[in-house]
Image (cartoon, rainbow, N blue to C red):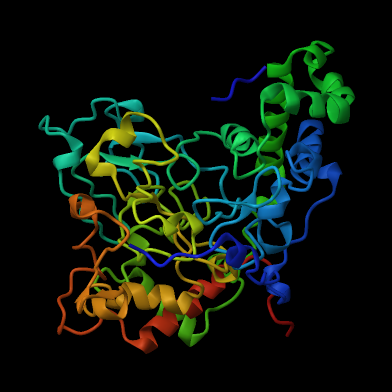
Amino acid sequence: MRSAQGAASITLAAFLSATPVGAASDAGSKTTAPGDADLSAVATIGKALFSDPKLSASGQMSCASCHDPGNHFAPSNARPVQLGGAYLDQPGLRAVPSLTYKRQTPPFTFGMLDPTSEAGEAAPQVVAQQGAGAKGAAGASASTQPAPQKTAGTSAAASPVPRGGLFWDGRADTLQEQALAVLFTHFEMAEPDRATLAATLRARYGDRLAQLFGEAVRDDDKMLIDEAAFALSRYQTEAVEFHPYTSKYDAFLAGETQLSPAEARGRALFDDPKKGNCAACHLDTRSADGRPPQFTDYEYEALGVPRNPAIPANADPHYIDLGLCGPLRHDTISTQPGNCGMFKTPSLRNVATRHVFFHNGVYTSLQQVLRFYAKRDSDPRAIYPTRNGKVARFDDLPTRYQGNIDRTDTPFGRKPGEGDALTEAEQADIIAFLETLTDGYAPPEE
């Protein structure tokens, strides 16, 4: 047995009527799933569980409802948050991430990074697991230390940093834990209790699970649920469609194709520490042992994206999503002010097929995302709302936590009047490069 551990308002009716956007239609955005013969017996059960709506309180929602296999296991609509619950009318709190490229995600740690390690491979020297009493090298509280400066291709953190874990706030260490959390969350699959879920699993999968794990699994609710969650994790780990590495950029790294002029310019801007500086967090080079880049350093950042009034929870001006500080994470990490407003850096693989961006889904296009990076500091009036004639900068984070926001790493740190960090042409080139990260690329026939 494996153990798991003042915004504008929007009415729910208006949210429910949001028009879904279909999955990307271009052939390059589709992945081909292997047959069951390519999976272990337990992963095959996991594949069935992944698409089974009977595991939800509504009987109509499966993992695949939000993690659409036809859209790289991300939502296929443009809602900022998805709907779940017993009657499929409960909106979530954050944008749903893709489930692709998750198997290499390290467990959550809060500690020092080894600056001598290869980019993207730095192992946290744990100061305190789950953040209990985390201290810097000089004994200062992590909440009082400035955010470390990042430079493309390096990991030069001089103070403890949060890293790893699943969900936007890293509160699950394994795919198994993540699956269990979703099954019982009231605005997701919303199973009312373990006994109810166990009864469903027993009726639908009891024979198959007993063949693998023994007859005792039938009568032990905890074992039955844990093994089902383990099967879900094995499916996501083994099935190639969760980590196909079939993008044009992968083909480029393998020497099988060339980038177009716009894509090549975009890559240079992506890497340039004085321009895009994207690679400081979204690592784009192979690891020391030759593994393809994951396009994330698994660390956490407070970026100060604008509040999204389309999230129903935000109709309450007192509601604030503080990332590592809750409302979904409840541990010592969540009590440290220096962590508030920080969210995990996502992988950029397949990012061009997403319909919403950032933890709150505030943007619906890559053009809007690049504009945010280019103008956040140089032209905040173009990014944030104006109240009583004054720009409400960082309007989704209370003033007491705004010191956590990254204000120094390029492309941030510019002052109004200094000009945007990236021109519109440069933004377009970076987007061209990001489009090469979509899986399913087929080189043109000669």
Which residue is more in the foreground, 395 or 421? 395
Residue 267: give x, y in percent of width and height.
42, 74
Q: In which quadrant of the rendered image does the C terminus lie?
A: bottom right
Closer-to-camera residue (311/101): 311
At horizontal 23% and vertical 43% (from top left) the residue drawn is 338
Q: Is residue 298 above or below residue 417?
A: above
Residue 264, placed above or below residue 352: below
Occupied quadrant, residue 73: bottom right
* In this picture, residue 397 sits left or right of residue 72: left
Along the horizontal axis of the image, is 364 left or right of 307? right
Q: Is residue 52 visible?
A: no
x%, y% of residue 169?
42, 43
Point out residue 353 in the picture as x, y percentages from the top left corner. 60, 69
Q: Residue at the spot x=36%, y=37% of the render?
A: 123
Q: Is residue 72 left or right of residue 152?
A: right
Residue 200 figure quarter: top right
- State the residue in front, 123 or 4: 4
Question: Which quadrant is home to the N terminus?
Answer: top right
Query: x, y percentage for residue 60?
Result: 78, 48
Q: Is residue 190 visible?
A: yes
Instruction: Tell me which corner region of the image, top left, top right, bottom left or bottom right, holds residue 266.
Output: bottom left
